[in-house]
Amino acid sequence: MDTKERKVAAFTGHRKKRMLRGDADNQALAGQIREKVSDMVMYLYGQGYREFYTGMAQGFDMTAAEAVLKLREHYEDIALVAAIPFRAQAEWFDPQDQMLYRELLKKADRVVMLSEKYYRGCYLRRDTYMVSRASMVIAYWDNVCNGGTYHTVKKAVETGREIINLFTGEVITDITALQNNHEPNKPNIKWTD
């Protein structure tokens, strides 16, 4: 598939605790992130994006899914694709997130189950799958060069995808910039209380 012809976006980001900078109950920051994601989905819709992939992990992935579904209430031509690394993914979530996960899956336009069972590397396979289908990757990455979000951003850069990092507000286009950026606590976006 030529990703230049189709405008497809994929989301990658941190789990809830890392996304909320160690305070899983930080509702103010969660609301600000939700607003940034919603604004980005609306912007991408205006740019012709109609298909959005999410890996449905706790935290940023499910926040992105909620934003896409909210916009779909007004624009029915939007599609949410849930790329699930293995069938029992949500069993490790807290009860509230398990309920949200099931709700989001019911509303997704398509669910892609990449494996019936967990295996080492299944999350990376899911991330590679999403990047291979996307022309744009929207990340919430704290610029720390380890973990699944870093892997996904790196894979996206290596394959020529455009990446927008909502954590910093920057467009990432150069793999060297990824490897040389070691200031995770200095985002360009000013989060307000």
Image (cartoon, helix red, strand yellow):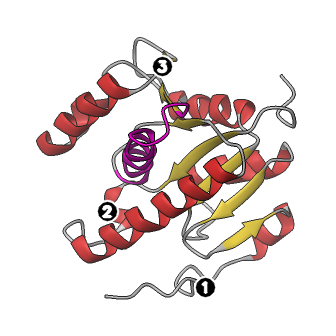
Task: Please tell me whether residue 140 is drawn above or below residue 3 in the rendered image.
Answer: below
Which residue is found at the position 30% from the left and 23% from the top?
106
Read off the residue under disc 2.
17
Q: Specify whether residue 150 is painted magenta.
A: no
Pick the front one: 91 or 110? 110
Quadrant for the C terminus in the image = bottom left
Read off the residue under disc 1.
188
* Helix, strand or loop under label 1: loop
* Helix, strand or loop under label 3: strand
Image spot of residue 26 (x, y percent): 23, 73
Quadrant for the N terminus in the image = top right
* Helix, strand or loop under label 2: helix
Q: Nearer the viewer, mark 1 or mark 3?
A: 3
Distance CA(mark 1)–CA(mark 2): 21 Å
Q: Which of marks 1 and 2 is nearer the N terminus?
A: 2
Which dot marks residue 110?
3
Which quadrant would residue 145 be assigned to in this image?
bottom right
Q: Can residue 108 be seen in this view?
A: yes
Q: How crowded is mark 2: few (under 14 residues within 10 Å), some or many (20 or more)?
A: some
Badge 1 vs badge 3, beta-carbon distance below 8 Å: no
Q: What stretch is highlighted in magenta?
A: 59-78
Residue type at mark 1: give it: Asn
> On the rendered structure, is 83 left or right of 133?
left
Instruction: State the count of labels.
Output: 3
Q: Which of marks 1 and 3 is nearer the N terminus?
A: 3
Pick the front one: 135 or 77? 77
Pick the front one: 144 or 58? 58
Q: Which of marks 1 and 2 is in front?
A: 1
Which quadrant would residue 97 be assigned to in this image?
top left
Q: How crowded is mark 3: few (under 14 residues within 10 Å), some or many (20 or more)?
A: some
